[in-house]
């Protein structure tokens, strides 16, 4: 899935410090909580759209969807999802749909773990992360 498309080690599913930074930057914990809740609600559909575009070999639709998910994933600290998006992006640029679909499968497999990580209460968490 990530082998050969990314020289870095597989990233953790979630990093809390990104959320803390976002809260600090916005000075609005409620807005960040709503953003994360919306991210969680939309995540399955976004992943499904990417997988559909990859199966159809619609590189324009896949690229648009993967870039959007990559950015929002980075904002909230969804490091593995961001990494998988980068892998798909690179594969699409190279025209390697097999690699893109492999990373897409990883994305689908990562979705439940990411949802759990974002929804689970953590000690010292600045905001409540529930949908």
Image: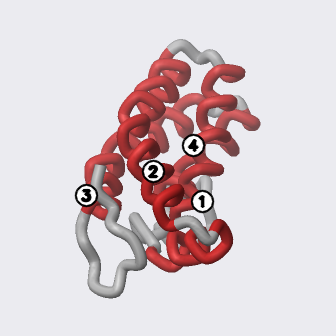
Along the line of sight, which residue is nearer the eye, 101 or 77? 77
In the rendered structure, the answer to whether residue 74 lies left or right of residue 129 reads: right
Give how far apart the Cα atoms at labels 2 and 4 are: 17 Å
**Judging from the image, what secondary structure is the residue with disc 1 in?**
helix
In the rendered image, residue 73, in percent from the top left (x then y), is placed at 54, 54
Give how far apart the Cα atoms at labels 1 and 4 are: 8 Å
Comparing labels 1 and 2, the label whose residue is closer to the camera: 2
Residue at (48% x, 43% y) in the render: 103
Disc 2 target residue: 34
**Judging from the image, what secondary structure is the residue with disc 2 in?**
helix
**Judging from the image, what secondary structure is the residue with disc 4 in?**
helix
Relative height, residue 4 to residue 27 (above, below) = above
- Considering only order in the chain, which callout, 2 or 1, is on the residue closer to the N terminus? 2
Label 3 neighbour load within 10 Å: few <14, some 14-19, many 20+: some
The disc placed on residue 69 is 4
Comparing labels 3 and 2, the label whose residue is closer to the camera: 2
Give how far apart the Cα atoms at labels 3 and 2 are: 16 Å
Along the line of sight, which residue is nearer the eye, 17 or 48? 17
Residue at (67% x, 31% y) in the render: 63
Label 1 neighbour load within 10 Å: few <14, some 14-19, many 20+: some
The image quarter in which residue 129 lies: bottom left
In the rendered image, residue 12, in percent from the top left (x then y), is placed at 42, 70
Disc 1 target residue: 74
Residue at (31% x, 52% y) in the render: 115
- Considering only order in the chain, which callout, 2 or 3, is on the residue closer to the N terminus? 2
Relative height, residue 120 to residue 84 (above, below) = below
């Amino acid at each position: 899935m990530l082998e050969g498309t990314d020289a870095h080690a597989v990233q953790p599913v979630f990093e809390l410090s990104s959320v803390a930074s976002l809260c600090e930057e916005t000075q609005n914990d409620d807005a960040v909580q709503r953003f994360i809740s919306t991210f969680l609600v939309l995540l399955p559909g976004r992943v499904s759209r990417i997988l559909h575009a990859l199966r159809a070999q619609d590189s324009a639709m896949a690229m648009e969807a993967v870039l959007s998910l990559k950015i929002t994933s980075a904002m909230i600290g969804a490091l593995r999802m961001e990494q998988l998006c980068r892998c798909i992006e690179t594969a699409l640029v190279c025209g390697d749909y097999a690699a893109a679909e492999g990373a897409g499968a990883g994305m689908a497999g990562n979705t439940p773990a990411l949802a759990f990580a974002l929804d689970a209460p953590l000690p010292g968490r600045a905001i409540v992360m529930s949908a």
